[in-house]
Amino acid sequence: MKGLIARAAAVVCGAAALTGGGCHWYQDLVDLRHALRGIPDVVVVNVRNTTTWQDESNDALLHWVRGWPAAHLADWYGHSTASMLSDGTHPWPRGCTIYAHVIASTLRSA
């Protein structure tokens, strides 16, 4: 797994890096994509949480990576369930293992 992480110069977690509390601002996504220019593999992780903005965030991330050859969407939402979350947002330890595997699998497929 260490070799995979070294290969990815950037892992972008949807909730933490892009939402700033839940709202995707188009210019922030444009600026971040510009800042990541030249990085060979950018793994973007979508979200699962109990907020009103979960679906909006995942939709924004899906559109953001479209047409960007270096970007690869890690589908945390598709590989997780609400029962994996300790507080509606953050995974329990067993969920963290799955989260890491989702990222590694996405990178292997890149």
Image: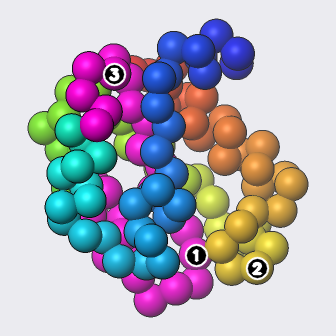
Gap between marks 2 and 3, in whole Å?
33 Å
Query: On residue 15, which mark appears?
Result: none
Residue placed furthest toward the bottom = 52
Mark 3 sits on what residue? 39
Residue 67 position in % (x across, y down): 13, 38
Q: Quadrant of the N terminus?
A: top right
Q: Residues within 10 Å of mark 3 (few under 14, many from 20)?
A: some
- The CA span between labels 2 and 1 is 9 Å
**Secondary structure beneath label 2:** loop
Give how far apart the Cα atoms at labels 3 and 1 are. Answer: 29 Å
Name the residue that disc number 1 marks.
49
Three-letter amino acid code at the position of disc 3: Ile
Vertical side of 17 occupied by 10: above or below: above
Seen in the picture, residue 68 relative to 65 is either above or below; the reply is: above
From the viewer's perspective, tell me whether residue 103 is left or right of residue 75: right
Q: Say which mark, if any, is on residue 87.
A: 2
Span of residues in magenta: 35-62
Q: Of helix, strand and loop, which one carries label 1?
A: loop
Within the magenta stretch, is there residue 50? Answer: yes
Is 16 contained in the magenta span? no
